[in-house]
Image (cartoon, rainbow, N blue to C red):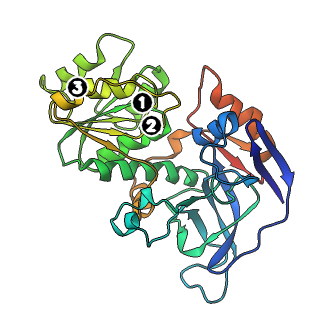
Amino acid sequence: MRALVFYAKNDVRLEEIPEPEIGPGEAKIRVTYTSICATDIEEWQFGPTYITSTPTVMGHEVSGRVVEIPDNISGLSVGDRVMVDNVLICGACFWCLSDSQATCPNMEVAGLGRDGGLAEFMTWPADHLIKLPDAVKDDEAPLLEPATVAVHAVRRSGVRVGESVAVLGVGTVGALTLQAFKAAGAIVYAVDVRESSLQMAARLGADEVVDATRGDAGERLRELTGGIGPDIVVETAGATRTPLDAFDWVRRAGTVVLVGIYAAKPEADFNVVVGKELRVIGSVAAGTGDMAAAVRLVAEGKIRLGDLVSAHISLERVIPDGFERMTAESKDVFRILVSPDA
């Protein structure tokens, strides 16, 4: 089969490799679509950072159809449309038993710790394949993975109905995060510097969009919240300055949720955190039940995925039409879907 294989920094190859064989408790899927994430591109440019073994088939946002499954596994059938719940945990360590599965030190992730979905076929534990309802389209399904990151951030935040939330950075994860907070009953403001991102935020239901290139965005957020500041600020941009903005713009005794992955290390004035008695929360990946919740929210129409699909490409075009396009200065895309059948 054809697969996109990571060997080292700037060494990703489209190769013919043997089709994977199912192991105990696993099912085999024919991949329908895999979406390209910024993490994939960072591994290609700077890695291996999160990839734990090489060579590895890339791709961690994956949907497909079941083509093989052992007779002793119930709940799935050949032909089922499924989403890969891509995080595997040990279930036995201190963190797993403390309901902090996203910090399991034994975690394995598709496309990073185990072979992923930028290929024609993939095997994965059957109990980590989620059947897709009819309301979730094949060419949207991979975005359930970043939607799961958004759902996890909402859980971590402890948001209450009616609270105000500012989302800093409306890329794919930010756009999904604002929808997840809306679904939780929050009033959501979107902040970005790109007009296309602000337009997307408005289309997806943001209560107000704030262009950070025009005037003082922090002051505008205070105006929108009666002079107080948002109850929660969620940083999804991963830029050097945005965590500091989050600390400055959130209200006193408010909550900052850091979701972005940072290529550079921001320097913060922690006196702001202390003086304002802020609650600062990191949120990474997902925990048990988060993907199932994301599937339900999408099926109910509370999170829209299709708006964020910018292009469809083949495996052969992942580097030039996927990675390179997403790293261009214009960055005119949200998610690009890869089909092995294209």
Number of labelled discs? 3
Tell me the residue at 85%/59% (across/down): 17
Q: Is residue 302 visible?
A: no
Asked if labels 2 and 1 touch by Cβ distance under 8 angstroms, the answer is yes
Coordinates of residue 260 in the picture (x, y in percent):
44, 37
Q: Label 1, on which residue?
A: 169
Coordinates of residue 73 in the picture (x, y in percent):
59, 85
Crowd rating for badge 3 (residues with CA inside 10 Å; few <14, some 14–19, many 20+): some
Crowd rating for badge 1 (residues with CA inside 10 Å; few <14, some 14–19, many 20+): many
| Foreground label between 1 and 2 | 2
| Foreground label between 3 and 2 | 3
Q: Secondary structure at mark 3?
A: helix
Q: Is residue 63 above or below residue 338?
A: below
Q: Nearer the viewer, residue 19 or 120?
A: 19
Kind of residue indicated by mark 1? Gly
Q: Is residue 239 visible?
A: yes
Q: Label 3, on which residue?
A: 272
Kind of residue indicated by mark 3? Val
Q: Secondary structure at mark 2?
A: loop
Task: State how far apart marks 3 and 2 are (Cα).
Answer: 20 Å
Tell me the residue at 42%/37% (across/down): 174
Coordinates of residue 80 in the picture (x, y in percent):
61, 72
Name of the residue lying farthest toward the bottom: 72
Kind of residue indicated by mark 2? Gly
Q: Label 2, on which residue?
A: 260
Left or right side of 146 for 333: right
Q: Secondary structure at mark 1?
A: loop
Left or right side of 149 for 268: left
Left or right side of 271 for 329: right
Task: State how far apart marks 3 and 1 are (Cα).
Answer: 21 Å
Asked if labels 1 and 3 touch by Cβ distance under 8 angstroms, the answer is no
Q: Nearer the viewer, residue 306 or 274?
A: 274
